[in-house]
Image (tube, rainbow, N blue to C red):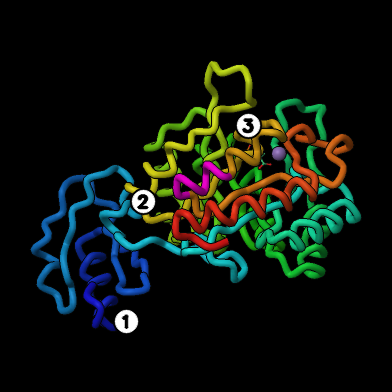
Amino acid sequence: MDRDATAVDVQRVVEAIERAGLKANPIPGSERTAIGITGNRGAVDPVAFENLPHVLEVIRVSHPYKLVSREFHPEDTVVSIGGVPIGGNAIVVIAGPCAVETLEQTLTIAHAVKERGARLLRGGAYKPRTSPYSFQGLGEEGLKILAEARAETGLPIVTEVLDTATVELVARWADCLQVGARNMQNFELLKAVGRSGKPVLLKRGMSATLEEFLLAAEYVLAEGNPNVVLCERGVRTFSDFTRNTLDLSIVPAVERLSHLPIVVDPSHGTGKRTKVLPMSLASVAVGADGLAIEVHHKPEEAWSDGPQALTPALFGDLMEKLRPVAEAVGRTL
Ligand code: PEP
Ligand code: MN
């Protein structure tokens, strides 16, 4: 729609799309509203819509993902997580423990990362563990601990939801629902978080192609939820010196194809404490909109992912070293 289009003009086009038996997906932008058309099996004749008042242009989206593509929505999307914008000029750092263990542990870490410049608190209450004998998370008790940490620090919460059965419960406590790498193609979960109304942090599956990653995000947008932040967290390769291979080249690739913000998780991406700082700097240098970093005040005692956790001191050092890199690429921290 052009920039003078009113809500009534948008509604008129939505109704015309629906009369043609198609689905209309309005996505408001800062300049203008775009209306994505989905549900078509073949090509749609643009003539039916292009002469309606305030329709600026009808664009054919050539990719299988429509709503996430830049063809459909050229301007960058800025996702607000509890009032913290991701995808604008400022780099946003999400930090916290791998898992919520105790109230004291979570509060200690939350205060430590807040003091050092983190804008969002992460921490898993539901943990997707490779072994059924590993700590599975505190569940609802963990969500309450996160909410207490939010109340004390003011940091909005990003936490993982593992299945459709707990989406409503997790959405009641969280500011952002994380869909983990192992669930990137859990299509029913993607639809459920799409209906939840909460922003979603979608992690790349460990063997997912760029197209599969963007189509997973498309599932969420197709449910009417435009607030998706993508997260590169490393993929499985033959490399034997890190836990995963952090594929930073996907950052500029995503930026070219999609309007959605993308953050990088160098903690799971490398699995090693010493590699988190250099890969964080590199992530910002290649254009990431933010970072997700695991921090623990006693990494050697962490119930999960201790080897990749930064201490608060190392996290502080990272934040200081990140600033000049952010500035060098025209961003703020
Ligand atoms: C996590 O962020 O704690 C996590 C389990 O990550 P991933 O899904 O990327 O393995
Ligand atoms: Mn972890």
Residue sitting at 81 percent across and 61 percent down?
A: 111
Distance between the alpha carbons at the discs numbered 1 and 3:
47 Å
Residue type at numbered disc 3: Thr
Q: Which mark is residue 296?
A: none
Dot 1 amino acid type: Ala
Q: Judge left or right: residue 113 versus residue 259.
A: right
Q: Residue 182 in magenta?
A: no
Where is residue 156? Give x, y as percent: 68, 64
Magenta segment's dominant SS is helix
Name the element at disc 1.
helix
Q: Which sits in the foreground, 28 or 312?
A: 312
Find residue 108 and report its horizontal and vertical position in percent.
86, 56
- Residue in the image at 29% along x and 42% along y: 64
Q: Which amino acid does label 2 sit on?
A: Ser
Vertical relation: 5 (above or below) 236: below
Q: Nearer the viewer, mark 3 or mark 2?
A: 3
Q: Nearer the viewer, residue 126 or 282?
A: 282
Q: Quadrant of the N terminus?
A: bottom left
- Residue drawn at x 32%, y 74% is 31
Decide if residue 22 is on the left or right side of residue 58.
Answer: right
| Residue 58 to residue 235: above or below | below
Q: Which mark is residue 258?
A: 2
The part of the image, by quadrant, that contains residue 244 is top right
Marks 2 and 1, how far apart in space? Answer: 25 Å
Label 1 Cα crowd, 10 Å radius (few <14 / some 14-19 / many 20+): few
311 with respect to 212 (left or right): right
Mark 1 vs mark 3: in front: 3
State which tag comes first along the sequence, 2 or 1.
Answer: 1
The numbered disc on residue 270 is 3
Circle number at residue 7: 1
- The residue stretch that appears in magenta: 281-287
